[in-house]
Image (spheres, helix red, strand yellow):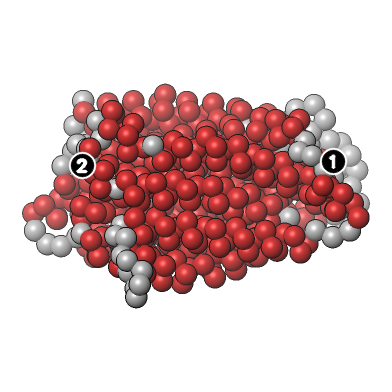
């Protein structure tokens, strides 16, 4: 018996089970690593929903709209910063594999320098948003009403970048449960601080919607302080203490930014296509907005799964590459793609089955509600098509990131979502009269093109000189 396509002889007792065993082990490792990451994303989403609900309930729709502008801008720049800091992951994973505490601390210092540099650029951009967004046509009254919230959330960016740094470090060390526990501990603090700072309590005056921004700043600062304390407790030994006193490695910082900035741009390009669809939906009428909003909320919840798989794949591939094991890298790749198949299939099936019950439960009766429900049902079916594609694309991107290959996926994302998907969506919407359904067809097409290009890149890289093939 010979190994397929190699001519190498195999042991007589070799079986399909022998080939499957290491890949199943990798799938279990991906599950252990990815589950806490997905839960973290869902908890963070819960905090965001809590903020929005409390602002809307306590101060009305106008107040909610006034903070939405600053919140959306914050989200875009946060994704840019978080993606950039993700460039640290393959390097830190390598240090973990080599059991090198001094190198881990050196990389932590590099990460701190990167977070500080990003904060110096991004915080002023959000702080001054009420001034410069007005020049772009955003309603001046909304911007002024939300100024307090926007400036508070701008300050929140600084500690949140630090939180992202330690999330990246803990994920690279395959200890995301520590971060999950910290995040869960902050959930009740977020709700209480929201109420106290917005409504006031005792001698504390109520700050209105701005209190939600200050609550976010408080929670982010508390999370960062706790994570730094845990990290300092882990920093032990003579080499570790020497690393703490060493200056920042500026060359290392440049390398991390070279890998990370394309990740940040990729993330913003992907998320931005969906945010852009939200803006465009606002021009198509109430039914289109309602249908789009429901579908986007469901997509946001589902997004936690492929994102977690992508981050887990980055760590596992970086670990395999550090060990210079071609077979190990191949097992990680195949296990990740198999996991993407499973996750995509489950999510797609859920949306197909839930399309009708969701639309009937979300919308009231009436002609406009019926129109929104019918459109939403179509969009949810399109989302069922997008999810498997997105899962494959996220998995392949994560594997490439583990190999420090981030520029090509950035180009593919820009090409798929913005050069092809966005124009196609507008064409189908305006010239083929498909409305918001046409916009979502464009989103699906952009996801398809991006996924195909990223998968092709992965297979070519894995079949390159000195690499094991995916087979």
Q: Identify the element where label 2 is drawn.
A: helix
Image point 35% across, 51% down: which residue? 149
User: Could you tell me which residue is drawn at 54 percent across and 51 percent down?
Assistant: 160
For residue 218, above or below residue 451: below
Q: Which quadrant of the view contains residue 91?
A: top right
Residue under label 2: 141
**Disc 1 marks which residue?**
324
Q: Residue furthest left?
A: 367
Give percent across and percent down for residue 394: 55, 43
Q: Could you tell whether 392 is left or right of 363 in the image?
A: right
Q: Gap between marks 2 and 1, in whole Å?
A: 58 Å
Q: Which mark is residue 188?
A: none
The quadrant the C terminus occupies is top right
Whole-percent x, y for residue 370 in the image: 14, 55
Above-or-below relation of 461 to 160: above
Residue 309 rendering spot, x and y as whole percentages: 59, 51
Q: Which residue lies furthest to the front in this view?
A: 203
Q: Is mark 1 on a helix, strand or loop?
A: loop
In this image, 244 relative to 416: left or right? right
Residues at badges 2 and 1 in contact (C-beta under 8 Å)?
A: no
Q: Could you tell me if residue 16 is visible in this image?
A: no
Residue 18 seen in the figure: yes
Determine crowd level at label 2: few under 14, some 14-19, many 20+ residues with C-alpha closer than 10 A: few
- Residue found 85% across the figure and 41% down from its top: 324
Q: Name which residue lies at 89% across and 39% down.
A: 8
Q: Nearer the viewer, residue 260 or 332?
A: 260
Q: Which of the 4 image quarters holds residue 322?
A: top right
Residue 50 at x, y percent in the picture: 37, 64
Is residue 405 left or right of 320 when viewed as pictured?
A: left
- Between 389 and 426, the residue placed more toward the observer is 426
């Amino acid at each position: 018996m010979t190994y397929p396509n190699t001519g190498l002889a195999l042991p007589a007792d070799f079986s399909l089970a022998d080939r499957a065993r290491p890949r199943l082990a990798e799938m279990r490792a991906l599950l252990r690593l990815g589950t806490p990451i997905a839960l973290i994303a869902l908890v963070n989403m819960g905090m965001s929903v809590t903020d929005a609900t409390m602002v809307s309930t306590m101060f009305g729709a106008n107040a909610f709209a006034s903070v939405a502008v600053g919140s959306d801008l914050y989200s875009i720049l946060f994704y840019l910063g978080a993606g950039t800091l993700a460039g640290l992951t393959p390097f830190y994973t390598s240090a973990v594999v080599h059991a090198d505490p001094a190198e881990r601390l050196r990389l932590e210092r590099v990460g701190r320098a990167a977070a500080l540099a990003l904060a110096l650029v991004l915080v002023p951009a959000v702080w001054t948003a009420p001034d410069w967004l007005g020049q772009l046509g955003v309603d001046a009254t909304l911007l002024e009403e939300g100024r307090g919230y926007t400036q508070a959330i701008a300050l929140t960016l600084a500690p949140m970048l630090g939180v992202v740094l330690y999330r990246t470090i803990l994920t690279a060390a395959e200890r995301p449960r520590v971060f999950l526990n910290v995040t869960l501990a902050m959930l009740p603090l977020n709700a209480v601080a929201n109420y106290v700072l917005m409504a006031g309590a005792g001698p504390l005056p109520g700050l209105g919607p701005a209190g939600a921004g200050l609550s976010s700043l408080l929670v982010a600062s508390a999370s960062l302080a706790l994570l730094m304390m845990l990290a300092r407790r882990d920093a032990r030994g003579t080499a570790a203490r020497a690393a703490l006193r060493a200056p920042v490695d500026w060359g290392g910082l440049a390398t991390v930014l070279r890998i990370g900035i394309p990740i940040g741009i990729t993330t913003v390009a992907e998320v931005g296509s969906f945010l852009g669809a939200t803006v465009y939906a606002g021009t198509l009428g109430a039914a289109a907005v309602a249908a789009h909003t429901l579908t986007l909320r469901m997509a946001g919840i589902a997004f936690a799964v492929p994102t977690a798989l992508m981050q887990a794949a980055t760590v596992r591939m970086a670990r395999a590459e550090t060990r210079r094991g071609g077979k190990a890298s191949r097992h990680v790749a195949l296990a990740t793609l198999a996991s993407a198949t499973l996750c995509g299939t489950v999510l797609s099936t859920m949306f197909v089955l839930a399309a009708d019950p969701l639309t009937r439960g979300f919308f009231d009766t009436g002609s406009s509600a019926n129109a929104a429900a019918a459109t939403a049902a179509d969009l949810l079916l399109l989302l069922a098509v997008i999810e498997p594609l997105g899962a494959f694309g996220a998995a392949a991107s994560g594997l490439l990131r583990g190999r420090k290959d981030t520029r090509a996926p950035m180009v593919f994302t820009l090409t798929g979502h913005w050069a092809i998907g966005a124009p196609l969506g507008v064409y189908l919407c305006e010239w083929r009269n498909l409305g918001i359904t046409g916009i979502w067809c464009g989103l699906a097409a952009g996801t398809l093109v991006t996924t195909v290009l990223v998968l092709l890149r992965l297979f070519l890289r894995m079949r390159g000189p000195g690499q094991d093939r995916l087979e």
